[in-house]
Image (cartoon, grey):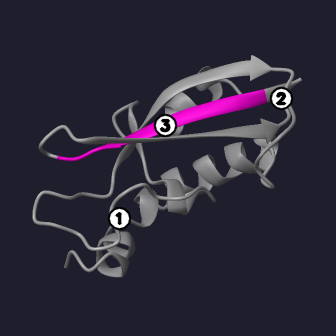
Amino acid sequence: MNTQLSYLYRDAWNYKRFHSIILPGIITLEQIEPFLREQTFFIPSEVGLPDLQEDVFKSYDHIWHEIEAIELIDEQPTATINASVLLANFKKAHSLNWNEREVFARKGLV
């Protein structure tokens, strides 16, 4: 059994970009939720996943993404990171306040 994690980036104009991966192992939203910003938002690059914004940031861009769905499936993994490592990465990112300032700087927003 593996986990499909689907997430999205929504800019200020509500334009959306979606991405989905299949992780080896099992992880649930209930496990991740305590580590999300406002129980909703996260920064994919801080947990080992790709960010979905355009390469060149616009004035209406930001760094936060949302989990759309997490479901258990029998399909083969598409990600090299496994569910337990991803959960550990969420815990670490949360404990570091998502490295928000560093991510803003890395993206050229400060």
In the image, which is nearer the foreground, mark 2 or mark 1? 2
Name the image quarter holding the C terminus: bottom left
Q: Which residue: 61% across, 24% down?
A: 70
Report the mark closest to the observer, 1 or 3: 3
| Residue at image point 54% right, 58% down | 50
Mark 1 or mark 2, which is nearer the start of the sequence? Answer: 2
Horizontal side of 18 relative to 3 (left or right) equals left
Residue drawn at the location 12% of the way across and 42% of the way down = 13
Where residue 12 appears, as percent x and y from the top left, is: 14, 45
* Amino acid at dot 2: Asn
Q: Mark 3 points at which residue?
A: 7
Q: Tell me whether the residue at label 3 lies in contact with that at label 2, contact meaning CB atoms closer than 8 angstroms.
A: no
Q: Are there few (<14), some (14-19), or many (20+) residues within 10 Å of tag 2?
A: some
Q: Distance between the residues labelled 1 and 3?
A: 19 Å
- Disc sitting over residue 2 in the figure: 2
User: Marks 2 and 1, Cα distance to the nearest angstrom?
Assistant: 30 Å
As for residue 7 lying within the magenta part, the answer is yes
Please, what is the three-letter code of the amino acid marked with disc 3? Tyr
Residue 105 placement (x, y as % from top left): 30, 80
Task: Return the mark for residue 87.
Answer: none
Marks 1 and 3 close (CB-CB < 8 Å) = no
State the image coordinates of residue 63 (x, y, percent, origin top left): 32, 58
Q: In which quarter of the image is the N terminus?
A: top right
User: Quick one: label 3 or label 2, which is nearer the N terminus?
Assistant: 2
Range of the magenta residues? 3-11
Q: Is mark 1 on a helix, strand or loop?
A: helix
Q: Could you say where residue 42 lies in the image, as x and y percent from the top left? A: 43, 46
